[in-house]
Amino acid sequence: MFRAFFALVSFLCPEERDHYRFKAHLKHIMNQSRIALTSGALVKAEGIVTLDQNIFVADTKDGGLREWLLHIPAWEGQSKGQSKEIPEGVPYAATAATMSNKTSSDVLQCTCHCEGVSFAISRPKPESSALHANWSDSLVPYFDNASGNGGDAKWWICANGTKYLATVCACKSCRLGSGYDLQFWLFCPEVNIQKTNGDPIDFEMGTLQRYHSSPGVSREFCKVCGATVFWRSDERPGFVDVSFGLLNADSGARAEEWVEWCSKRVSFLEFAQNRALVESVSAGLKEWATREKKHIW
């Protein structure tokens, strides 16, 4: 259990596996009469869970997912009657385009909710391209049997070596690990992640705890607030997938001065439990990339 605010309590799954404690968000008690469940933890969600509204959009600064979900009702804060409504079909952040081009900062600070895990990401450097990795499913679907990357493309580096690639994942492992239908990742070489004091990253630091979700795969999370932090695989040595919600970018939640979003597809869409929900986000992401003239990955 983690108390985020005086009236909000998060309950986490404390299941022991492989001698590590794995935590997935299960529910939030908002008040005595309302309980919010995380849809990814449900055994069945298709036809039961729908995208009904988008709240607290103002907290994102740049509109966040609102820019991908223009067809659903949205509010700057709490829902209807409690905050300003954002007109349907209208993007939230009028200044997002200019803010997304801001590249002056060389360090991106990241932290979980309780601040037990804090680290920093630096801009790509020559060592960032010295690695080899198979294609991400976001770019080359796993089922196409063509993900080997024989040409050694450095697909994780974007914008002439100044940004990283970010993606949305709907795989079963990410869903059950976080408790949510979608998980957002930034692909980052380990050499570009440091402690806040500049030392190399330590995967035992602070309140980090590890869970082996499958053979050769490690997922780190905060054992206090339950935040998803890292995903790492033995098949991709030197790489770290960083959970996007921890990024404190100046421009806002999408951190466009640091990443380019893969809009070609939602990764592992075929494994989505709530196909309608995930396809809606996928379609909105593609529409946003076209509307805003983003690079189409």
Image (cartoon, grey):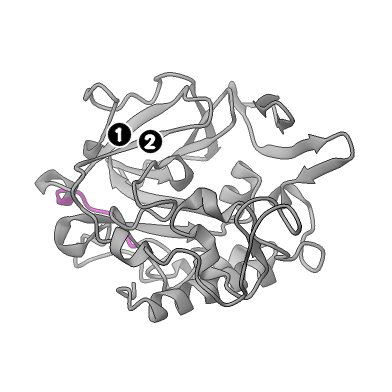
In the rendered image of this protein, does residue 266 appear above or below residue 4? below
Which image quarter holds the N terminus?
top right
* Residue beneath the point at 44% across and 39% down: 246
Most foreground residue, 90 or 148: 90
Q: Look at mark 1 in the image and give the residue it sits on.
A: 120
| Three-letter amino acid code at the position of disc 2 | Cys
* Residue beneath the point at 45% across and 53% down: 61
Q: Look at mark 2 in the image and give the residue it sits on.
A: 110
Side of 254 relative to 281 (left or right): left
* Residue beneath the point at 22% across and 53% down: 132
* Disc 2 secondary structure class: strand
Q: Quadrant of residue 127?
A: top left
| First reached walking from the N terminus: tag 1 or tag 2 | 2
Q: Quadrant of residue 155?
A: bottom left
Rendering coords of residue 218 (x, y %): 46, 36
> How many residues crowd mark 2 within 10 Å: few (<14), some (14–19), many (20+)?
many
| Contact (Cβ within 8 Å) of mark 1 with mark 2 | yes
- Inspect this view and state whether residue 217 appears: no
- Inspect this view and state whether residue 266 appears: yes
- Please tell me whether residue 69 belongs to the stretch shown in magenta: no
Rendering coords of residue 213 (x, y %): 55, 39
> How many residues crowd mark 1 within 10 Å: few (<14), some (14–19), many (20+)?
many
Rendering coords of residue 36 (x, y %): 77, 45
In magenta, the rendered stretch is 129-135
Which image quarter holds the C terminus?
bottom left
